[in-house]
Amino acid sequence: MAEKSTRQRQPAARRASARSTHVSDAAEAAERAASSLTQLIDHPVEGCSEVAPTDDGGWLVGVEVLELGRIPDTTSLLATYEVELGGDGSLRRYRRTRRYWRASADTQ
């Protein structure tokens, strides 16, 4: 029991780094990015739209997030976040790159 209470007192970053391991593929990178982002922004993840390895062994992941659910669902507000992970799956940075209505289409 004492072991569990000691673990809870450790900073979250230390607990996360203790369980971080090398991310071996795109699916795992997407899963880690979505999980890390959800903890920080408290919005549900809709999915990942991009996963790419970086030159230094990390990952760059585009995560689609529901920022404001509305009725009808086609008027819900979504956002794309760019999440950068280290090779061990740790979150390096994130930023919102786009906000859009669910029913809108890219014009590019």
Image: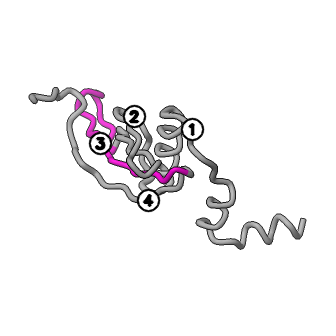
Does dot 4 land on a helix, a strand or a loop? Answer: strand
Q: Position of residue 18 (x, y in %)?
A: 68, 60
Q: Is residue 87 left or right of residue 6?
A: left
Residue where numbered disc 3 is placed: 80
Q: Is residue 104 left or right of residue 59?
A: left
Nearer to me, 67 or 45: 45
- Which quarter of the image is occupied by the C terminus? top left
Name which residue lies at 28% across and 51% down.
96
Q: CA distance from mark 4 to mark 2?
A: 17 Å
Does dot 1 land on a helix, a strand or a loop? Answer: loop
Nearer to me, 103 or 37: 37
Residue where numbered disc 1 is placed: 24
Q: CA distance from mark 2 to mark 3?
A: 9 Å
> N-terminal of the two: label 2 or label 1?
1
Does dot 3 land on a helix, a strand or a loop? Answer: strand
Nearer to me, 87 or 8: 87
Task: Give amino acid for label 1.
Answer: Ser
Question: In the rendered structure, which segment of residues is drawn in magenta?
Answer: 67-87
Q: Residues within 10 Å of mark 1 (few under 14, many from 20)?
A: few
Residue where numbered disc 2 is placed: 48
Residue where numbered disc 4 is placed: 92
Q: Is residue 62 left or right of residue 74?
A: right
Q: CA distance from mark 3 to mark 4?
A: 17 Å
